[in-house]
């Protein structure tokens, strides 16, 4: 039962320092999972909130499945993420104490289920982002030289 990576939120790695990650299930409808399997989905603009003890992903864009004949869903509706209660409590406590953000990192299939890797992240300052760009540049140049 291997994992099949569908997409990565590249912006997240650039804008945030990733501290901790979790795997969460997603509550979906039939046509939504079919769209996800077709990679008709985006998590770049998505963000995660915890409300009333439930973890929700907002603004995750799943296109309507073209062959769904009777169900048309709102592409960016709020979807519930499935995590254990003790994990949710731990995450909430850290968000409040350390002023962190929950961000979606990766969307992948594990067996028949769509899973979302979510992370606690600390927003990078502009200086840190410049540093990341410099490091990337250096890596590219080294790889060019090696070739």
Image: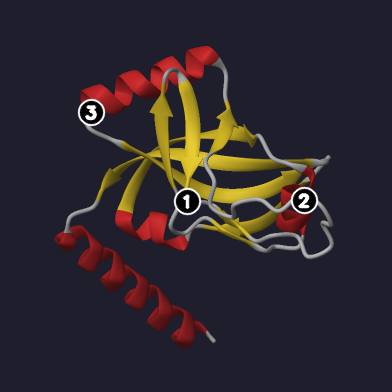
User: How far, Cα to Cα, is label 2 from label 3?
Assistant: 38 Å
Q: Nearer the viewer, mark 2 or mark 3?
A: 2
Q: Tell me the tag on residue 59.
A: 1
Q: Looking at the image, which residue is at 33% across and 76% down?
A: 138
**Mark sitting earlier along the chain (1/3):** 1
Foreground of the two, 107 or 32: 32
Left or right? Give the position of 140 relative to 41.
Answer: left
Residue, far front = 70
Residue occupied by mark 3: 98
Residue located 56% across and 50% down the image: 106
Look at the numbered disc 1 and give the secondary structure of its residue.
Answer: loop
Q: Closer to the N terminus: mark 2 or mark 3?
A: 2
Say which residue appears at 82% left-offset and 41% top-offset. Answer: 112
Q: Residues within 10 Å of mark 3 (few under 14, many from 20)?
A: few
- State the residue lying farthest toward the top: 86
Task: Assign a secondary structure to mark 2.
Answer: helix
Q: Nearest the camera: 4 or 146?
A: 4
Residue 134 in the image: above or below residue 73:
below
- Residue 6 location, x and y as percent? 67, 58
Q: In the drawing, does residue 5 fall left or right of residue 43?
A: right
- Residue 85 at x, y percent in the picture: 52, 14
Front label number (1 vs 3):
1
Residue 113, image x and y in percent? 76, 39
Residue 145 against residue 24 in the figure, above or below: below
Q: Which residue is mark 2?
A: 31
Look at the numbered disc 3 and give the secondary structure of its residue: helix
Q: Quadrant of the N terminus?
A: top right
Q: Do labels 2 and 3 touch, CB within 8 Å?
A: no
Q: Residues within 10 Å of mark 1 (few under 14, many from 20)?
A: some
Identify the image's colour scheme: rainbow, by chain, secondary structure or one colour.
secondary structure
């Amino acid at each position: 039962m291997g994992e099949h990576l569908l997409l990565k939120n590249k912006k997240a790695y650039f804008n945030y320092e990733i501290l901790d990650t979790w795997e969460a299930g997603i509550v979906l409808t039939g046509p939504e999972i079919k769209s996800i399997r077709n990679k008709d989905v985006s998590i770049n603009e998505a963000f995660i909130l915890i409300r009333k003890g439930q973890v929700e992903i907002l603004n995750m864009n799943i296109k309507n499945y073209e062959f769904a004949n009777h169900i048309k869903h709102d592409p960016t509706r709020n979807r519930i993420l499935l995590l254990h209660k003790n994990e949710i409590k731990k995450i909430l406590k850290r968000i409040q104490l350390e002023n962190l953000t929950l961000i979606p990192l990766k969307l992948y299939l594990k067996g028949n289920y769509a899973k979302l890797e979510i992370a606690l992240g600390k927003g990078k300052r502009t200086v840190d982002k410049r540093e990341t760009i410099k490091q990337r540049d250096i890596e590219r140049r080294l790889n060019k030289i090696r070739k």
